Image (cartoon, coloured by chain):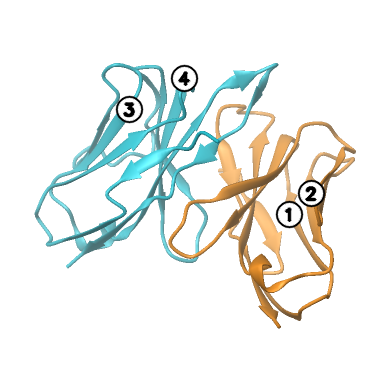
Amino acid sequence: EAEVAQSPRYKITEKSQAVAFWCDPISGHATLYWYRQILGQGPELLVQFQDESVVDDSQLPKDRFSAERLKGVDSTLKIQPAELGDSAMYLCASSHRDRGIDTQYFGPGTRLTVL
Amino acid sequence: GQQLNQSPQSMFIQEGEDVSMNCTSSSIFNTWLWYKQEPGEGPVLLIALYKAGELTSNGRLTAQFGITRKDSFLNISASIPSDVGIYFCAGRWAGNNRKLIWGLGTSLAVNP
């Protein structure tokens, strides 16, 4: 069964450093999402791509976060500089529209710890 | 913004018991999804509901899309230890079909 791949699974960094996360969606899924999940809460959408275009980045802290999906397939989320409050699970999800229905499938996530 | 109220916040039950959890909204939703998340992993889709009144099963799990379109419930029958995890409801608000709104989760612990 096809899955969303993410790497790394765990990342420990010091504040003010740069970090990057990678996501490879399920083949054929045009829509890709990056979420941030703080412990004890539900996922919070950071950015949504349709193919290579951003369709929603209203919750992305653009002063330090950036995301790209240059060829409309895999995607990278970057934080520069990292802050202590960025410690969280970063989840990638993908979906495609089938008969008007759009269901998101998640990867295993990247657990970020900022020291 | 739109919010989902998910309850209970946590449950501690004996193996073999049935479990019920629900999600409510003040607005009409046109999609309800139920996910399970285990520690250190991403959410896994359990059941998706797309029509008011729809009742769908997945093994020991059953979920329903409320008739008012403002609520959904998830039942787990005859719980087993591997049911442990956090169960999230998520839905699409009729006013913004693109965005998924999430509940805060129900943490389930099962005592063998």
Packing grade of label 4 (10 A; few <14, some 14-19, many >=20) is some
Gap between marks 1 and 2, in whole Å?
5 Å
The residue to which callout 2 is attached is B72
Q: Is residue A13 left or right of residue A6?
A: left
Please name the color used to draw chain A. Answer: cyan
Q: Secondary structure at mark 4?
A: loop
Q: In the rendered image of this protein, does residue B74 appear above or below residue A31?
A: below
Q: Position of residue A8 (x, y in %)?
A: 27, 49
Which chain hosts label 3? Answer: A
Q: Nearer the viewer, mark 2 or mark 3?
A: 3
Q: Is residue A72 left or right of residue A39?
A: left
Query: Of the numbered discs in the image, which one, if any, rests on residue B23?
Result: 1
Q: Secondary structure at mark 1?
A: strand
Q: In the rendered image of this protein, does residue B14 appear above or below residue B48?
A: below
Gap between marks 3 and 1, in whole Å?
33 Å
Query: Of the numbered discs in the image, which one, if any, rests on residue B97?
Result: none
Gap between marks 4 and 2, in whole Å?
28 Å
The residue to which callout 3 is attached is A74
On the same chain, marks 3 and 1? The answer is: no
Gap between marks 3 and 4, in whole Å?
10 Å
On the same chain, marks 2 and 3? The answer is: no
Q: In the rendered image of this protein, does residue A83 appear above or below residue B96?
A: below
In the image, the chain rendered in orange is B
Give the mark count. 4
Q: Nearer the viewer, mark 1 or mark 4?
A: 4
Q: Secondary structure at mark 2?
A: strand
B1 or A29, nearer to the observer: A29
The residue to which callout 4 is attached is A30
Contact, CB < 8 Å: mark 3 with mark 4? no
Residue under the image location 44 percent in, 44 percent down: A107
